[in-house]
Image (cartoon, grey):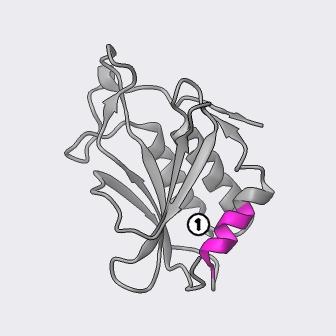
Amino acid sequence: MTTSAITSILVSALPPTPTTPTSTQKTNHWHLHLSLPLPQKGIRMDPSPDANSLLTLIVSQDKPPQYIKTIALSSVRENLTASDVIEELRKAGHENYRFQDGQGCRHWLITSLAVLRARGVLRSDKEVEGAEEALKGVWGDDGELVKEEEQSEVVVGTFL
């Protein structure tokens, strides 16, 4: 894991998918992206369910996928590292999470941002509130909210 200081934290959405194969409602899968000082460099944290619906937090340094919506949280603690972020989430018990029916990344991210704000990792209430609001919506390929009838509620998983 890199020890370079993080310059910002991004919350980014992938294109929408149906919540179930027969549903007209959609959802986005979201990532937490830790930006590093070098252009196009960062650490992607992908909260995904495993075969038992338990959290698998995939942490990688590869180039991020094409996101349709990104919210930047640029007011971060000085000299913040990826290890610091992971440790704060671990101390809050955020590594033990069960998704509900394969969904729950939005809830995990909303609560994780609240933890990072409460622990001083994120320093701006306004930025965190803006990210939380974005996470509550479903975003289309054009980066705009999908129609109301296509919106889905934030699915709440369970912290274990």
Q: Is residue 121 visible?
A: no
Residue at screen point 59% across, 26% down? 100
Q: Main secondary structure of the magenta part?
A: helix
Q: Which residue shows up at 34% across the image and 68% down it?
A: 63
x and y percent of residue 128 in the render? Answer: 55, 57
Which x, y percent locates residue 50?
57, 38
Whether residue 128 is situated above or below residue 99 in the rendered picture: below
Q: Residue at x 29, y 43 (%)?
A: 15
Residue 37 drawn above or below residue 1: below
Give the left or right position of residue 99, taking residue 73 as reference: right
Q: Quadrant of the N terminus?
A: bottom right
Picture quarter containing residue 72? bottom left
Q: Is residue 119 visible?
A: yes
SS of the residue at dot 1? loop
Residue 88 location, x and y as percent? 73, 63
- Using residue 34 as the reference point, say whether residue 85 is left or right of it: right
Q: Amino acid at mark 1?
A: Ser
Q: Is residue 29 above or below residue 42?
A: above
Residue 39 against residue 136 in the figure, above or below: below
Q: Residue at x 51, y 29 (%)?
A: 102
Q: Quadrant of residue 118?
A: bottom right
Residue at the far left in the pictured view:
142
- Residue at the top extreme, as displayed: 22
Highlighted range, magenta: 80-88
Which residue is under mark 1?
124
